[in-house]
Image: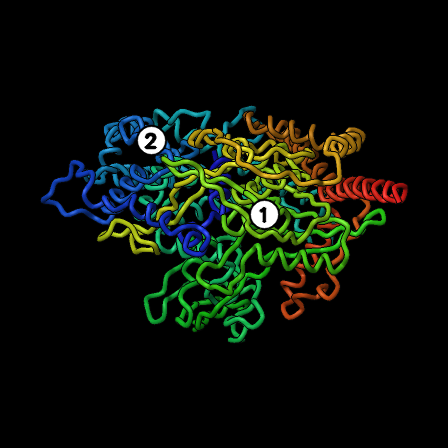
Amino acid sequence: MVVKARKTRFLRYFWIMSDAIKYLLNMKRLPIVILMLVAGSFLAFKTTGTGARNTSVPPTKYEQILKLVGDMLQQAHYSPQDINDAFSRKVFRKFIGDLDAEKNIYLQADLDAMKKYETKIDDEIKGAPVEFFLAAGKTFNSRLDEAAKMYDELLSKPFDFTIDEEVILDGDKLNYAESDAERKERWRKKLKYMALERYTDLVDIREKNKGKEGFVVKTDAELEKDARDKVKRIIDRTFERFRLKFSDDDKFNLFVNAITTTMDPHTEFFPPVDKRYFDEEMSGRFYGIGASLQYDDGNIKIASVLAGSPASKSGEVQAGDIIQKVAEGKAEPLDLTGYTVTDAVKVIRGKKGTEVRLTIKKLDGTIKIISLIRDEIVQDETFARSAIVKNNGSKIGYIFLPEFYADFDHPNGPRSYIDVAKEVNKLKEQKVDGIVIDLRNNGGGSLYDVVQMAGLFVDEGPIVQVKERESKPSVLKDKDRNVLYTGPLAVMVNEFSASASEIFAAAIQDYGRGVIIGSTSTYGKGTVQRNIGLDAENGFSMSNSDLGTIKLTLQKFYRINGGSTQLKGVSSDIVLPDNLEYLKVREKDDPDALPWDEVSKTTYNSWKSGYDLKTIQQLSNQRLESDITFKTIRESTDWLSKQNDKQYSLQIDKYRKEQASLRATIKQLETLLKLENSLDVTALPGETNKFESDKNKQDRFTQWIKNLQKDIYLDQAVKVMNDMISQQNLVKNKATDEGKKAF
């Protein structure tokens, strides 16, 4: 299913996991013997698993990588599955599904022909010649050419939108086509649905603009032709990408990831350029030209230029320019046709001080070749930031943390826990009555940083338990007796709060230090990965390698109360209905996810909060029960979840009726998700124009504040915080009164 594929790709970019090898090296409190044990797991790589290789044929890069990956999975993965015929069958199905999610490329006969490989993938992993992905890729390319002819022919003729028929768009509900005719019919319905979407939009535009000066009124037939032309441009670009940006290497990378993610969803293979991109996203810094990109009708376009960057200093790069080609110094230029923004970013970035040449089409149509020298670009917009919310006489601090970032390569580089500490100190200077930490959509990051960050809010003690494959759990502790902030604390989470976010939320919850507010539960990722380079000589390396890198699941983490966050996540103390619940993209929705389990509880002292959680929950529930907004959100999301499981009409009247209901529900949700009466949210004193040197950044920061002012979930968090403040004030006043009586 297209939607499912998009979700999978989104989540793979969403999770920014820790580079825990570097974490161990930086975490001086942990004994170096742990690192030695990790390394020892791989010493036998070159001598194990001879496989079924023909020794007269030297191994290719593919066989080298696959053998190293297989050894690594078996010897070091936290919970390895047996790499046997059953495992092979799962990888077979996943790889074919990744290639053809909508089941409109392959025929059933192709799968029958490839069935001979179904139980051979495990042999390939163990050293046999790599054949399956090449055979599957060859057939894919051939069928792709056939499909291209089909869609070309189908889009050359008008569609009749009066015929009463339906289309299934979920590939999971379809079998592979038995014949060319059946496959062509599948394409016909898909293309007709896409054209129907655009045709009805064009008709609506025509009706709204009739009579306006200069507007050309087209006939239904002309609009139908325009709709088909739009669809053809979209499909052309998709197939263009397949032809130009889906080489054997790309298919192999997909194949290796089908293997690793069958072991568990978070064990992934990174080709060298992808690993560099991963590190850049983790650290918040990279070397590039300082321009943000956007995809626009098949082109990679400059969206904005960062002030003071190489692009800005050149005076030759402006927003709206189209990047057609990229060259590394004097090398042959690479055509960006078929590239996504992420693909383009990867080739434009590089090493500091190196030359990159861009072939750019200017707004006036002229073509220019611009030479730029890459320099350091810091993504400071992704770092922690704070604001002040004034409500009912209270002043509440708000801290937004998009990820637990850490720049391991620079000792003085940005660290999330240090930045959060700075924001806490700023808020304390403003004498806030409570603090809300927003971890919504925070996919995790550095394990070291989350331990230190939790320590800002609790006295010394355990934060999380970490268990290796065959050992007892070790306890990661905060050893600092100082507590930076002792006042009321709330943590906002949602379905996409994962990994390190869950560690933080769980620790705060287990200590009774604060209240967790958000969706029914967080994502449910309770595993720890380490990035390990594949090295042909030594088996593995501590740094990136030319063969690629495995982000390998080597540990599981557990709450200090003994339960894992794996699969179950962290349940919110205050549950707020949200519009993401129906997406079903949590860890528990992945069939390859590792199971939930628990270990012994560790010893810790609960925080004396000064408030009663049950009372806080009762007050929140009373508000929500009488709040029509959240009741409607719950009903709307339940309805939307059912729309994913239906067939779609290709008859225009029925389609319009379905779309009217869908649009009305979505529009209602969009309206409900914005407060009618804005919250009083402001930037900290002196930070209103914190990005004034860069207009684009400043505009985004200003919009961020405006969005917070309309955020219904922040509004509820503030109400909960006011309840906490009121309860704590009552306790303090009672204690003061009793003290006076005693005196």
Rate crowding at label 1 as few (under 14), some (14 to 19) or many (20 or more) other CA atoms within 10 Å: some
Structure colour scheme? rainbow
Task: Looking at the picture, tell me which residue is in the foreground, 601 or 3.
Answer: 601
Quick one: SS at disc 2? loop
**Residue 338 visible in rendering:** no
**Residue 395 visible in rendering:** yes
- Determine which of the numbered discs, if any, sits on residue 81 in the image: 2
Rate crowding at label 2 as few (under 14), some (14 to 19) or many (20 or more) other CA atoms within 10 Å: some
Label pair 2/1, CB-CB below 8 angstroms: no
Looking at this view, name the residue that lies furthest to the left: 56
Circle 1: residue type: Glu
In the image, taking residue 605 as reference, residue 488 lies left or right, namely: right
Whether 230 is drawn above or below 315: the answer is above
- Determine which of the numbered discs, if any, sits on residue 84 in the image: none
Q: N-terminal of the two: label 2 or label 1? A: 2
Quick one: SS at disc 1? loop
- Depth-wise, is mark 2 or mark 1 nearer the camera? 1
Residue 66, quarter of the rendered image: top left
The quarter of the rendered structure image containing the C terminus is top right
In the image, taking residue 716 as reference, residue 359 lies left or right, namely: left
Q: Where is residue 154 in the image (x, y as percent from the top left)?
A: 44, 37
Name the residue located 48 percent from the left edge and 53 percent from the top edge: 298
Question: What's the distance in space between the residues labelled 2 and 1, CA to CA?
Answer: 38 Å
Whether 316 is drawn above or below 297: the answer is below
Circle 2: residue type: Gln
Name the residue located 56 percent from the left edge and 40 percent from the top edge: 502
Q: Where is residue 350 in the image (x, y as percent from the top left)?
A: 41, 64
Q: Where is residue 594 in the image (x, y as percent from the top left)?
A: 43, 32
Task: Looking at the picture, tell me which residue is in the foreground, 378 or 631.
Answer: 378
**In this figure, which residue is indicated by the disc labeled 1?**
460
In the image, taking residue 493 as reference, residue 119 lies left or right, namely: left
